[in-house]
């Protein structure tokens, strides 16, 4: 079994492309099922966040199976076009490299905001959806369980998550730069009542904003979030959005709507009622909440999730010294996982070789007993011990060769293992079961 990962993220694709490849919790089960239906895929999981969409699969073969092309084709289908050239935006990794990538993602080392505190929960959720869909087995179960372990260790043992460690925090930092270090006297409207909205609103309060208004299509969720926030936070019904846009100084959008909720027409009307007073929109949703072109309206300043990079880069400098420590934890985790992974393959082979040699020795002893009835038990015991000694020498050489071959991640190492299986007549016993 081989591990393979393919995806795109904030480094390889802008938000315009990423938002076409987002899977929400409702669409994930069907998407995972479609992924496992690909002939090359045995196990599958999908990690989909505002900054990345990644496919993790377990396959029988990588080099000749066309797994890369199959997964790119799958994403093209999701995006709704086969003409879209996704290859130039995708990255991929196999085996040890795929493991390292998964662990770096779970640790927040591959995030837009270094050390962000939400990615670990997102990885856990991705694993849960795949497991609930019956799409994981020993390979991906082991991979994700170890990834979560490594991610937790990075957070507890390093300071990589200090400072700005979430997209919401970066959005608030941008808002404070627009209006100064404090947001005193400003009214901030938060659209959406999910985790991202909660994180954003709490950072807004920490920056001195006395007026935080939460609005959500499900009003009860907005009420709950406002109550949790305290400090004068209020809930507002979504059907009063047009009035809310007139009174707010800053709007931070982070809903899960599949289409824009702030259209050019809606914002233009709000600006007319605001008498063209400056209006700042920070859209951290993927798919985007604000329609393309709104930024062209006079006195409207729109920032999307990709615009947070400058804020993130500044924060990164404060925590760069922690990256080496975090990377060391990831490297150790990869080594531990690969040791376990290789044992899955070599242990059954070693046991099978021992069983084959024991069987040959037993057959030979039966032949000796049949052809030499005059030998007493002491003689037979001596012969059996001699055969055991030869058996142990053969087994030792085979085991050393197995461990050496298993320690290599290239195709030659796997070819060597197949040669050993053939030498002991075990090749048919270790063929992958057809899907």
Image (spheres, rainbow, N blue to C red):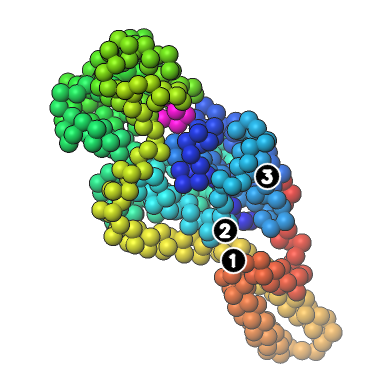
Left or right of residue 341, residue 366 in this image: right
Q: Is residue 93 above or below residue 264?
A: below
Classify mark 2: residues with Cα within 10 Å, few (<14), some (14-19) or many (20+). some
Q: Pick the residue in front: 303 or 189.
A: 303
Comes first in the chain, label 2 or label 3: 3
* Badge 3 element: helix
Instruction: Report which quarter residue 196 is drawn in.
Output: top left
Classify mark 3: residues with Cα within 10 Å, few (<14), some (14-19) or many (20+). some
Residue 95 marker: 2
Which residue shows up at 36% across the image and 32% down it?
303
Q: Position of residue 302 (x, y in %)?
A: 36, 28
* Badge 1 element: loop
Which residue shows up at 50% across the image and 33% down it?
16
Q: Position of residue 9 (x, y in %)?
A: 48, 44
Q: Pick the residue in front: 406 or 112.
A: 112
Residue under pointer 1: 409
* Badge 2 element: loop
Instruction: Report which quarter residue 383 is drawn in.
Output: bottom right
Q: Is residue 235 magenta?
A: no
Residue 70 marker: 3
């Amino acid at each position: 079994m081989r591990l393979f990962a393919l995806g795109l993220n904030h480094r390889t694709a802008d938000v315009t492309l990423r938002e076409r490849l987002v899977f929400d919790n409702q669409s994930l089960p069907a998407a995972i099922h479609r992924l496992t239906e690909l002939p090359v895929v045995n196990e599958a999981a999908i990690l989909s966040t505002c900054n990345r969409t990644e496919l993790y699969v377990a396959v029988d073969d990588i080099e000749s199976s066309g797994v890369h092309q199959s997964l790119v084709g799958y994403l093209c289908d999701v995006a709704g076009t086969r003409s879209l050239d996704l290859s130039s935006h995708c990255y991929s990794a196999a085996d040890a490299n795929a493991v390292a990538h998964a662990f770096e993602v779970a640790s927040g080392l591959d995030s837009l905001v270094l050390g962000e505190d939400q990615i670990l929960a997102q990885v856990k959720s991705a694993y849960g959806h795949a497991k609930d869909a019956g799409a994981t087995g020993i390979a991906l179960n082991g991979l994700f369980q170890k990834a979560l372990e490594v991610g937790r260790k990075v957070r507890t043992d390093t300071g990589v998550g200090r400072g700005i460690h979430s997209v919401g925090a970066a959005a608030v930092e941008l808002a404070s730069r627009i209006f100064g270090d404090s947001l005193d006297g400003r009214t901030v409207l938060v659209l959406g009542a999910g985790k991202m909205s909660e994180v954003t609103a709490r950072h807004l309060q920490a920056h001195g904003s006395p007026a935080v208004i939460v609005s959500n299509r499900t009003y009860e969720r907005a009420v709950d979030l406002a109550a949790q926030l305290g400090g004068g936070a209020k809930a507002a019904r979504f059907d009063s959005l047009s009035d809310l846009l007139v009174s707010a100084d800053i709007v931070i959008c982070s809903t899960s709507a599949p289409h824009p909720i702030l259209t050019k027409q809606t914002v233009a009307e709000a600006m007319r009622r605001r008498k063209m007073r400056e209006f700042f929109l920070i859209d951290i949703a993927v798919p985007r909440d604000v329609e393309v072109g709104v930024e062209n309206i006079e006195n409207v300043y729109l920032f999307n999730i990709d615009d947070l990079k400058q804020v993130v880069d500044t924060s990164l400098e404060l925590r760069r010294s922690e990256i080496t420590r975090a990377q060391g934890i990831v490297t150790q985790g990869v080594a531990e996982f690969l040791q376990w992974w290789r044992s899955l393959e070599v242990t059954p082979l070693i046991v099978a070789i021992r069983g084959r040699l024991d069987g040959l020795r037993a057959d030979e002893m039966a032949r000796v007993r049949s052809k030499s009835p005059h030998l007493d038990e002491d003689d037979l015991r001596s012969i059996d011990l001699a055969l055991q000694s030869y058996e142990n020498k053969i087994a030792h050489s085979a085991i050393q060769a197995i461990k050496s071959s298993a320690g290599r991640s290239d195709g030659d190492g796997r070819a060597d293992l197949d040669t050993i299986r053939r030498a002991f007549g075990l090749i048919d016993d270790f063929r992958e079961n057809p899907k």
